[in-house]
């Protein structure tokens, strides 16, 4: 067995002194760290409340990501009392105000010390169509529901989210509204809108109006005239493709003689004439 050499009293005392010194050093080190942190925090608050670190007006709020609404319009949505110490401003509150008061999908804000300002980032809801309710949608509605989506004129984004027209016009009077009109879109049909809009946007034949007042007959107003599709179905993209194949139709038929184009069966498109005669168009004539 290994023999353990005896430790003298002097050695034990030296070790105890060494441990005490180490403990004192660690305590002093922690106190210095706490003091430095408190001084830094206090210094930041002092600096932020100093006149140099004030947000004096809305021009110290920068807006990024907006393509539709102007910086000035979005700044007007933010409620702040000026001047305001920089660190007393809550970025999350600014983001909340923008999301609730403006057509914004999401918003974020951060404080910046050098130079003192608030940087705001937004994702806007882009209106792509005007939503016009069918007359029957408003008949018999209680007064409290007249402001509900789809019951009054509004705007739609590409996902079918309804927005009041005032959400844009109150912020910017000169903002151009979309030309595409949608009549009679019902809340229960909203989930179809993303596919409908995607197909309409890709169509080489301009589509100006979508009339859904009769759920059994979806009607389009296009550069070729009126187009009837019947009830909406998952064949809608195929129907729009068939419409594109008819884009040379005015070169073959006088448009003023056409009552409507029937695409209820996109594989057999037909034309209804005002003279009560109907011509069937096969795939070769479509071109």
Image (spheres, rainbow, N blue to C red):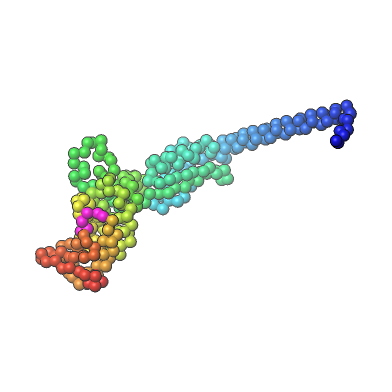
Residue 277 position within the rendered picture, expressed as x and y whole percent measured from the top left: 11, 66
Residue 272 position within the rendered picture, expressed as x and y whole percent measured from the top left: 15, 64
| Nearest to the observer: residue 277 or residue 90 | 277
User: Where 100 sits versus 258, above or below?
Assistant: above
- The residue furthest left is 276
Residue at image location 20% in from the left, 56% down from the top: 230
User: Where 13 sits versus 226, above or below?
Assistant: above
Residue at image location 40% in from the left, 46% down from the top: 104
Q: Is residue 19 left or right of residue 258?
A: right
Whether the magenta-drawn stretch holds residue 280 is answered as no
User: Where 225 sits versus 30, above or below?
Assistant: below
Q: Is residue 125 left or right of residue 59?
A: left
Span shown in magenta: 227-233
Residue at image location 64% in from the left, 33% down from the top: 38
| Nearest to the observer: residue 277 or residue 147 | 277
Whether the magenta-drawn stretch holds residue 228 is answered as yes
Residue 45 position within the rendered picture, expressed as x and y whole percent measured from the top left: 59, 35
Q: Is residue 175 visible?
A: no
Q: Is residue 153 left or right of residue 33?
A: left
User: Picture quarter containing residue 75?
Assistant: top left
Look at the magenta stretch and give its main secondary structure.
Answer: loop
Residue at image location 38% in from the left, 41% down from the top: 101
Residue 35 position within the rendered picture, expressed as x and y whole percent measured from the top left: 68, 32
């Amino acid at each position: 067995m290994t023999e353990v050499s005896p430790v003298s009293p002097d050695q034990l005392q030296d070790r105890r002194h060494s441990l005490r010194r180490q403990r004192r050093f660690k305590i002093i080190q922690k106190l210095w760290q706490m003091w430095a942190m408190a001084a830094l925090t206090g210094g930041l608050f002092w600096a932020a409340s100093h006149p140099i670190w004030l947000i004096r007006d809305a021009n110290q709020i920068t807006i990024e990501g907006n393509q539709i609404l102007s910086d000035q319009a979005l700044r007007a949505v933010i409620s702040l009392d000026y001047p305001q110490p920089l660190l007393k401003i809550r970025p999350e509150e600014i983001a909340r105000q923008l999301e609730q008061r403006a057509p914004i999908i999401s918003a974020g804000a951060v404080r910046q010390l050098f130079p003192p300002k608030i940087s705001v980032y937004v994702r806007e809801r882009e209106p792509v169509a005007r939503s016009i309710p069918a007359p029957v949608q408003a008949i018999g509605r209680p007064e409290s529901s007249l402001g509900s989506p789809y019951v009054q004129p509004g705007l739609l984004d590409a996902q079918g989210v309804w927005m009041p027209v005032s959400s844009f016009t109150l912020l910017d009077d000169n903002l151009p509204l979309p030309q595409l009109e949608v009549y009679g879109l019902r809340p229960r049909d909203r989930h179809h809108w993303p596919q409908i809009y995607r197909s309409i946007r890709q169509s080489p034949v301009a589509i100006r109006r979508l009339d859904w007042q009769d759920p059994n007959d979806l009607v389009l107003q296009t550069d070729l005239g009126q187009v009837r599709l019947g009830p909406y179905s998952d064949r809608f993209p195929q129907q729009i493709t068939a419409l594109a194949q008819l884009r040379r139709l005015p070169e073959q038929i006088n448009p003023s003689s056409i009552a409507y184009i029937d695409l209820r069966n996109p594989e057999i498109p037909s034309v209804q004439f005002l003279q009560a005669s109907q011509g069937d168009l096969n795939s070769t004539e479509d071109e």
